[in-house]
Amino acid sequence: MKDAKTFSIKTIENASIAIFFVVIFALTAIYEQSYLYALSDYTLYLDSDPFRSIIFSYGAGTLSFAARFITQFFASPIFGVFAVSATLTAIYAVLLKGVTKQTNAKKIGMAAVPTLTLYVAICNLEYLLFDKVDGSVVMSLLLGSLIAVLLAWWMQIENRISLYLSIVAAEFSYFAIGVFSPLAMLIGATSYIKRDNKIAMMLAGIGLASWFGFNYLTSTQLHYEVYSIAMFAPLYVQHSSSFFFYSLVAMALMIAYPFVANRCQDEAELPVKKILSPGIAFIVVIVIAKLCCYNDETFHKILRLQQLENEDNWAEMIKEARETEHPTSDVYAYYVEALIAKDEDVDKMFNFPVAWESFNTSNFVVPHMIHYEDFAFATGNYAMSLFHAMEYYQLTGENFRRLKRMMRCAVMMEEPKLTERYLNILETSGVYSDYAKEWRKYVGNKKQLLADKPAYANFESYFEKQDDWFHNYSAADFIAERGNITNPKIAEARILAELYAKDLDAFVKDIPVAARIYDGHMPPKCIQEAACLCAISGNTTAVQSINVDRNLALNTQKLVNEIRRAGKNARDKFEKYQGSYVYFYFYQDVDTKNYKGGSLSK
């Protein structure tokens, strides 16, 4: 600062970076805390194999793994607020001070445009969060963008050796960061347009070639992913979604930004009266960005109710639900769950204080997909809750929320071995290891859980089974009505649930639908053994629908004959076969009291 009426441009830039962080932090803390918590809840990070190997095998697997690792800590929403704000501020700072050489007050608003478009993108997952989207995609976009602008910054160093090293680093980082590798080179290309067109053309050519070439290699030779998905890895989101659209816009703006910024003339300092113009532009961009974020009250209310449910804060759930202006069936379901947990008069569920309205959203969501297993659990139907948690876990992606639900179902169903399996998985996550230790004391000790947690006692005893329509609605009926019965992935999820319930009659009816997913290769061993069991009992439909290994069939026949001769009391004699479905079928006890069966082909 030379005098009271003039400021250094660098001082103004530093001040704008600080203001940017404060504004983004405040907006995110006020409006998006429950959303950030949900990102953690709807993702999965396990510090173990084969989880690591599977993630690294994806396109941009390294970036996806890092994003999952960070996203798990969003279980503390304030950490999520800080992580998102800090990453966006770092991107803004690099664009403002690193990617281009000019110092000009106009760049303050220019650099904010692509950065705030990224903010709009991450706040527009909408209802896709519940459907085939991993919550870590938000941090994948932010981390990838930060890496891209840092690589582009590296390319600006006035040293040919450093330039070539940065190009090589950007090029061969494709398999680690996916789409953000060619993005870095394209940003670098537009930075060189005025200074050196040869370098600009070289970077643009390499960037575009790698964008269309490397992802072809990825999709056909390495990871066997769909070409269009590999092209935009790791942004595994429907290409018609708002998130994907805004992500592409942000990338285009980051590419265009250096070209526009380099056309500004250098300024060393600025009079006070001229600061007003970039300041207003900066504020206008922030306001527009906030208006473009997904502000659906119902969506944010559902996320808030789910967070409160995880915290067992039932009284606040009731309060939040009753203050909803446009309640949907999902809000209503969580409201009823909280009433049951608090042992309040359930007649209140029929006296919801707001006129019932349907509320349209831009993304289609399968009815009940959000709350179904949660509501089934709250009404004491643990078998149905477990089945649907398992099915959605497979169909919409692995996440902590449904893994925790499955574990709690296993406790309430008094299945200690199944509970142990889920707890062992949860213990390999950094965030939920303490949670797993807390629940381990309830393995095989359901009475202690009901004594410690009154809500679970209410879930156990609230409804009289004979008066509860919900328990008479079978899982198979639900899938047949709500899902596409020709989808083999749905059928596979269903028959695995049937095998767990030992319902081989339903299994025989559903296996022809699921068989299409195994065309050309062997199905899982448990399904082959179940098909053999059906054939031994006289029904050959299953073995005619799928491929069954001949040696496995012969061994299954032999084992079944031995078990039948030995009888139920000879369990110890066959312990070496633990892990086979035949052993499970004859010797493992399961709770099927609420299982109604059914067929997907009805």
Image (cartoon, rainbow, N blue to C red):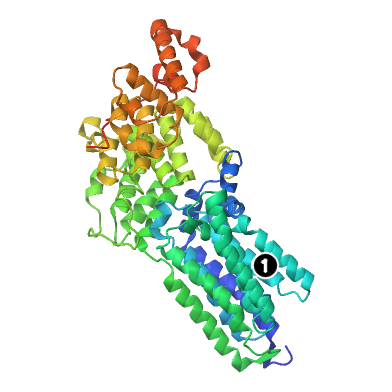
Please name whichever residue, 501 or 473, is drawn nearer the observer in this view of the structure.
501
Query: Considering the image in quadrants, where does the C terminus appear?
Result: top left
Residue 598, quarter of the rendered image: top left
Residue 6, quarter of the rendered image: bottom right
75 on left or right of 11: left
Q: Amino acid at mark 1?
A: Leu
Q: Residue at x 55, y 49 (%)?
A: 223
Please name whichever residue, 363 or 152, is drawn nearer the observer in this view of the structure.
152
Q: Residue furthest top?
A: 565
Residue 310 place in picture, x, y as percent: 45, 46
Q: Which residue is mark 1?
A: 151
Q: Residue at x 47, y 49 (%)?
A: 42
Q: Could you say whether the residue bearing mark 1 is in a helix, strand or loop?
A: helix
Residue 363 place in picture, x, y as percent: 35, 60
Evaluate whether residue 188 shows in this view: no
Please name whichever residue, 156 or 369, is drawn nearer the observer in this view of the structure.
156
Q: Residues within 10 Å of mark 1 (few under 14, many from 20)?
A: many
Q: Residue at x 47, y 77 (%)?
A: 287
Residue 407, relative to residue 367: is it above or below?
above
103 on left or right of 252: right
Evaluate whether residue 415 shows in this view: yes
Residue 33, relative to residue 557: is it above or below?
below
81 on left or right of 266: left
Residue 516 place in picture, x, y as percent: 36, 39
Residue 246, relative to residue 503: is it above or below?
below
Q: Residue at x 41, y 50 (%)?
A: 306
